[in-house]
Amino acid sequence: MKSITKLLTEKVSAAFEKCGYDSKLGVVTASDRLDLCQFQCNGAFSGAKLYKKAPFMIADDVAAVLKEEGIFGKVEVVKPGFLNLTLTDEYMLELTKEIEADKFNGVPQAEKPQTIVIDYGGPNVAKPLHIGHLRSAIIGESLKRLARACGNTVYGDVHLGDWGLQIGLVIAELNERYPDWKCFSADFNAETDAMPELTADLLCEVYPFASKKSKEDEDFKAKAHTATFELQNGREGYIALWKEILKVSIADLKSNYSKLDVDFDYWYGESDADKFIPELMQILEDKKLSYESNGALVVDVELESDKAPMPPVIVRKSDNSSIYATTDLATIIQRRKDFNPDKIWYVVDKRQELHFTQVFRCARRADLVPAETELEFLGFGTMNGSDGKPYKTRDGGVMRLSDLIQTVTDASLARLENSSFVNEDDKESYAQKLGMAAVKFGDLINHRSKDYIFDLDKFMSAEGKTGIYLLYTVSRINSILKKTGDCKAELNGVYTEAERDIMLKLIMTGDTFNYAMEEKAPNYICENAYQLAVSFSHFYHENHIMDEQDEAKKASWIALIKLVRTMIVKHLDILGIETVENM
RNA sequence: GCACCCGUAGCUCAACCGGAUAGAGUUUCAGACUCCGACUCUGAAGAUUGCAGGUUCGAAUCCUGUCGGGUGCGCCA
């Protein structure tokens, strides 16, 4: 179904046209002044310039037509030329019923569904997930769910960092520690030689160690670069070792992502793009885009309009190995072939913006995708500690994602300990859901491009805009519905102001989804979910459903809170948040 | 040095292409349970939108300058 402002815009536009004005003036938005009206149209102001006529005169003309519509309880023209609109209760009830019956819960479906690839997650193999990966995972997951809910075909691709220098570092370090491993010898035979048993813990320890070492030890750094090059050029022992690293890492990553309830459709890595690199290089050469500079192969991506120097993008390092720009470009070729997408979204730390600007420009110059394919960088900010600096552990190290999850799960468990509503058997699994709800909501309520401060107490609170408050609201509705399970449920009227408020919020939901999708920003979904919950809580305190003697009223209320629950759950699902039965 | 982003209530954030009285949450204070879950709800207080100009019927929003913070700037990802 259509969003309400779209629907009203059509009606008001038609009214403008009927009065002899440009229909484009009829844009309707949600009201800034809920005390005056539900919706407003400011088109008369623009019209005043166009037609050299006082805005209120134009608004008056249009209002006269709109009064005939029958769906408006109030059409008012105020002061200079505001056109204020309020719906009748009958029409609001009708719209609410439409949402109730709609299989998409009122989420407007794309007129032209598109194929979208979302590149998010971006973990590196052989490196534990840390909190830096958290935002990409939960923002990307949420955008994926949002785009899907709007009727698009969406593929989530984890885009594993499995082909760069970091692997070379790990291989070089393992070589120094375990020189006896067969895979390091030149005559390694993949068929007959045994591979060592690796563990995730070992890899997690080796990478940071090797990374630090490479910064202090030039000799070691050179070895890592050589290992990277040899791996990328098919040295058998390294390939075999790399496969082992991959196997162990991916298993570990999958278990962590599943705790986050983040699910990728594809587990492609940079290495999967490797086979498209020759094609990429050929295209760049054929189009005379690539040339040698300081020993590396580069492509110019400067534009006339650039205000700052734009460095060329390096597509092959001077040691002949590929770099992330190479794999990102080759991945674009791969995605075009596999999915032929309309859009590719990159949910990546905003500090990588320059890199992606370079990659996109290079892809355009080389026509790696059709001109109408959108390549969009959706950068996100960092999660900071209370000092406003990137979140660290107490000893100053990078906090592991699994530690963060443990912290919030423990806090949730403590909260559930005293709850008489939850069975002992459920407490563990509920605590995980509560913890994830707290973290995800606390993250997603902020606009994705902004940094924010991680505050455990704030996120775990049931007061305010938190995931816990929303879960609590849902569980309270559950509780009522359990007790009124045998009663009739049917929307049949608007009896109180509080219901009117709930219905308006429900009706506005379609616009929220449209806007969130347009902006690719889940924070609007968070806000709307919270608004729905607040409206419910208000209604709940004012009206006693179970004791209500008027059967029709009771039936309508039950149906209404059922719908509120459905809608909150829908919002939370798009945020990647699971609810609990009770808490 | 150059470029980009950000400065809104004590704190954390909103404000949909420039619109009405700049909204929420939190904190503080004052209230509401014999009643469907008080992990709740209601109310009050709290803002010269960093600063100075400009554009116009109208500016948190656009332009210029300035101060403060963050980020990035060829072989890491």
Image (cartoon, coloured by chain):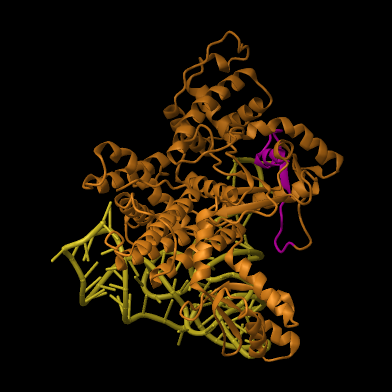
Q: Judge by depth and name the residue closer to the eye, A301 or A572.
A: A572
Asked whether residue A26 is in view, the answer is yes
Residue A384 visible in the shown view: no
Residue at the (62%, 67%) spot, across then down? A7
**Which chain is depicted orange?**
A
Letter of the chain shown yellow in the rendering: B
Q: Quadrant of residue A295?
A: top right
Q: Say above or below: A172 vs A70.
A: above
Q: Foreground residue, A47 or A259?
A: A47
Choose between A456 and A181: the one closer to the eye.
A456
At 71% from the left and 58% from the top, the residue drawn is A309
Q: Is residue A236 above or below residue A440?
A: above
Which portion, as a residue range, is magenta?
Answer: A306-332
> What is the x, y in percent for residue A529?
45, 59
Query: Could you tell me which residue is drawn at 62 percent across and 30 percent down?
Result: A228
**Farthest residue in the top direction?**
A192
Give the side of residue A231 with respect to residue A427, left or right.
Answer: right
* Number of marks drawn: 0
x then y, percent, for residue A17: 73, 78
Residue A316 x, y percent position in the rendering: 72, 38
| Residue A387: quarter of image | bottom left
Quarter in which the N terminus of chain A is drawn: bottom right
Percent coordinates x, y for residue A344 in the rendering: 67, 47
Looking at the picture, tell me which residue is in the foreground, A560 or A446: A560
Residue A459 located within the stretch drawn in magenta: no
**B36 sits left or right of B72 in the view:** left
